Amino acid sequence: MAQARAHSGLLTMWTYIARNILQRIVTLLIVSIVAHSVIHLAPGEPSQVDPSNPRMKPSDIENIRAAFHLDDPLHLQYAYWIRDLFTGELKSFKDNQPVLPKIWQRFLNSLPLLICATLIIWSLSFPTGIHAAIRRGSVYDRSTTFTAYALISIPGFFLSYIMILWVVDTFNVPVIGMKTFGMEDADLAFRSMDRLWHLVIPSLMSAIGGIAVLSRYVRSQMLEVVGQDYIRTARAKGLSEDTVIYRHALQNALLPFVTMFGFLLPALIGGSVIFEQIFAWPGLGRLGYEAILARDFPVILTINFIAAVLTLAGTLVSDLLYAVVDPRIRLQ
């Protein structure tokens, strides 16, 4: 009986996953069609990027339009883009280089920045928010609240410029880019430390706003949970305060953060565009920004497609994690 029940539950889970994947594939198709239409209907074309270029002749423009199917109807352009994307033959308007290898390289550059910023945000936000909720109305609570709202109000790019000036003036070390110029011939230890140093400042600047917002959210959720009847019951049973807070209250307050965790994946695309520009970090967000300026349709569309895939994958992960975090949720 138990074995049959387990088999039925497993079958239900896989049916749920398959149904959700199918729904997301349909959604992805619709998103790609809408994005393709909107981008191609926007004013401006790749052949108009630099009309003052004396080397650009009318025949060259015609060749560009023919090579990239710009004179074909939109539905044919969409079909060509999908075909080239999945066959690996999609090339950039800007430099005629394959799009997928270019995006993959920038993805690898953005990944450590996102991981470090996320670790900083989640490592500092939860202790700050939990302690502020436990000590509600205290000096600690008021000071963290003031600091959080101040960090939310101050633009991140302004703080980044101030940090760059302070670090360079105080320590006389470079912080722009992924590595220091001239370190190519240094040994592995020095190059690793240099890469880590260049990663610290942009990661910290990327995380500051997230820490301010998430710590307030943690505090709000903890205050809501701490006031529940089962928390008062746990305290009445004589459980220690740490057990009440970290085992009972925190476990139930974590459920809304599962949704936020699912959106970490699409943050690889646009989560740090401003900071990648300021710190000259060759990441994926910066590539998308440069592609928009150059009207590089293949790169823009592919990055948008990848962002949609990551968003849908993140929401699927969140849905599955809900069942893990909260046993009351059943996969129907």
Image (cartoon, helix red, strand yellow):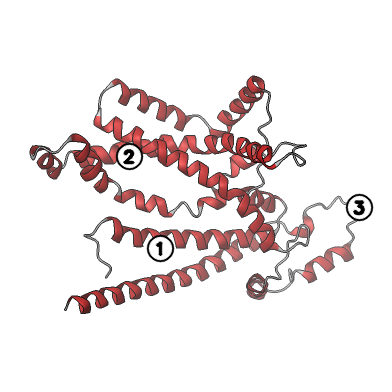
Is disc 1 placed on a helix, strand or loop? helix
Is disc 2 placed on a helix, strand or loop? helix
Q: Quadrant of the N terminus?
A: bottom left
**Circles 2, 3 touching at the beta carbon (< 8 Å):** no
Q: Residue at x 91, y 55 (%)?
A: 55
Query: First in sequence: mark 1 or mark 2?
Result: 2
**Circles 1, 2 touching at the beta carbon (< 8 Å):** no
Specify the amino acid type for callout 2: Val
Disc 2 versus disc 3: distance between alpha carbons?
Answer: 59 Å
Q: Quadrant of the C terminus?
A: bottom left
- Read off the residue under disc 2: 218
User: Given this view, does label 3 or label 1 mark the residue nearer the observer?
Assistant: 1
- Circle 3 residues within 10 Å: few <14, some 14–19, many ≥20: few
Specify the amino acid type for callout 1: Leu
- Read off the residue under disc 1: 316
Looking at this view, is 31 or 205 the one in front?
Answer: 205
* x and y, in percent, of residue 62 in the image: 83, 67
* x and y, in percent, of residue 138 in the image: 27, 22
* x and y, in percent, of residue 244 in the image: 19, 40
Picture disc at residue 54: 3
Picture disc at residue 42: none
* x and y, in percent, of residue 89 in the image: 71, 71
- Circle 1 residues within 10 Å: few <14, some 14–19, many ≥20: some
Q: How many marks?
A: 3
Q: Is residue 27 left or right of residue 185?
A: left
Residue 298 appears anywhere in the view:
no
Quarter holding residue 85: bottom right
